[in-house]
């Protein structure tokens, strides 16, 4: 194989590959239907010309056939009158027209056959075009569906299912972590408040008890507002100090012991 043959084959192969890749089914189908319609127009024109030629040939045939019959009658008339020369001349004219009519008859038959063939071809082409239009619409719909499916698959492959699911899992972990931090902060805040209130409540009890003890020692009214030794009716009862209060020593010893305990704490 020569070098030029190899180069030619490579060039043709590359061109065919480029053309194949550039072929869009929808555009090719549209162009095919357009080409078929152009062929249909040309075929219709050919059928019209053939019919017109057939009619002209038929008219010429009928005319020559009529002339041949007329000259036949004239030859008979001349012969009946005894004029053989005129009858012979009429027969010559009749022969010429008859020969022309015979030739035109053959052409007319050929034109009829040709016209019938063109008509059948025209009908077949119209049927093919109608079928091609229907098939074109179906193929275009299938091509569009295939393109859409291909684009969808490409989009799905580009998204990457595993990567997307991993991203969702990471975000879910972050949300759970945020919720845990929020819950822990709420519990810490709540426990702090409760602890403060418990401290206040405990301190209040101790202060009340201490005030009550001071009131008892000093003989002043208790924090509750009631005077020692008085009833709810307000009557003054016996306010004479007890023996232990007058002496005061046991109370002082008890206070001193209490102070030591508090200092040791």
Image: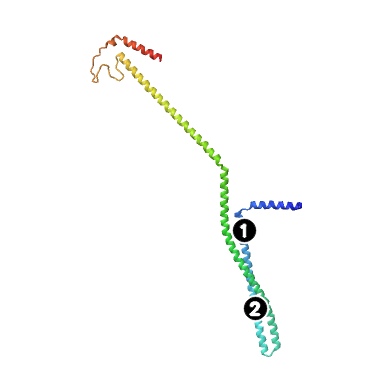
Residue 159 in the image: above or below residue 104: above
In the rendering, at what x and y percent does residue 36 appear? 62, 61
Residue 86 in the image: above or below residue 131: below
At numbered mark 1, what does the secondary structure look like: helix, strand or loop? helix
Q: Residue at left 64%, top 67%?
A: 46
Q: Residue at left 68%, top 88%?
A: 79
Residue 245 in the image: above or below residue 51: above
**Drawn side of residue 252 relative to residue 107, left or right:** left
**Drawn side of residue 231 relative to residue 259, left or right:** left
At numbered mark 2, what does the secondary structure look like: helix, strand or loop? helix
- Looking at the image, which is closer to me, 114 or 56? 114
Q: Looking at the rendering, which quadrant does residue 216 occupy?
A: top left
What separation in Å lies between label 1 and label 2 (alpha carbons)?
Answer: 46 Å
Q: Which residue is mark 1?
A: 32
**Residue at far right of view:** 2
Q: Residue at left 66%, top 87%?
A: 76
Q: Quadrant of the C terminus?
A: top left
In the rendering, at what x and y percent does residue 192 appear? 42, 25
In the rendering, at what x and y percent does residue 250 appear? 32, 10
Q: Which residue is mark 2?
A: 63
**Drawn side of residue 90 relative to residue 144, left or right:** right
Task: State which mark lies toward you, 1 or 2.
Answer: 1
In the rendering, at what x and y percent does residue 197 appear? 39, 24
């Amino acid at each position: 194989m020569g070098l030029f043959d190899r180069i030619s084959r490579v060039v043709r192969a590359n061109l065919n590959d480029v053309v194949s890749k550039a072929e869009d089914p929808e555009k090719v189908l549209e162009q095919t239907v357009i080409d078929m319609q152009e062929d249909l127009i040309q075929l219709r024109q050919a059928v019209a010309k053939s019919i017109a030629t057939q009619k002209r040939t038929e008219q010429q045939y009928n005319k020559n056939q009529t002339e041949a019959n007329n000259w036949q009658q004239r030859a008979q008339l001349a012969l009946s009158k005894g004029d053989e020369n005129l009858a012979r001349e009429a027969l010559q004219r009749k022969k010429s027209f008859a020969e022309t009519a015979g030739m035109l008859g053959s052409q007319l038959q050929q034109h009829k056959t040709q016209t019938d063939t063109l008509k059948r071809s025209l009908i077949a082409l119209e049927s093919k075009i109608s079928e091609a239009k229907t098939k074109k619409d179906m193929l275009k719909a299938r091509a569009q569906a295939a393109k859409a499916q291909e684009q969808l698959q490409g989009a799905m492959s580009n998204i990457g299912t595993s990567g997307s699911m991993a991203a969702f899992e990471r975000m879910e972990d972050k949300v759970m972590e945020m919720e845990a931090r929020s819950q822990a902060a709420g519990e810490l805040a709540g426990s702090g408040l409760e602890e403060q209130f418990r401290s206040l409540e405990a301190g209040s009890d101790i202060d009340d008890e201490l005030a009550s003890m001071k009131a008892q020692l000093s003989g002043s009214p208790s924090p509750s507002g009631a005077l020692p030794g008085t009833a709810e009716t307000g009557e003054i009862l016996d306010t004479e100090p007890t023996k232990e209060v007058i002496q005061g020593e046991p109370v002082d010893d008890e206070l001193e012991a209490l102070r030591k305990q508090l200092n040791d704490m």
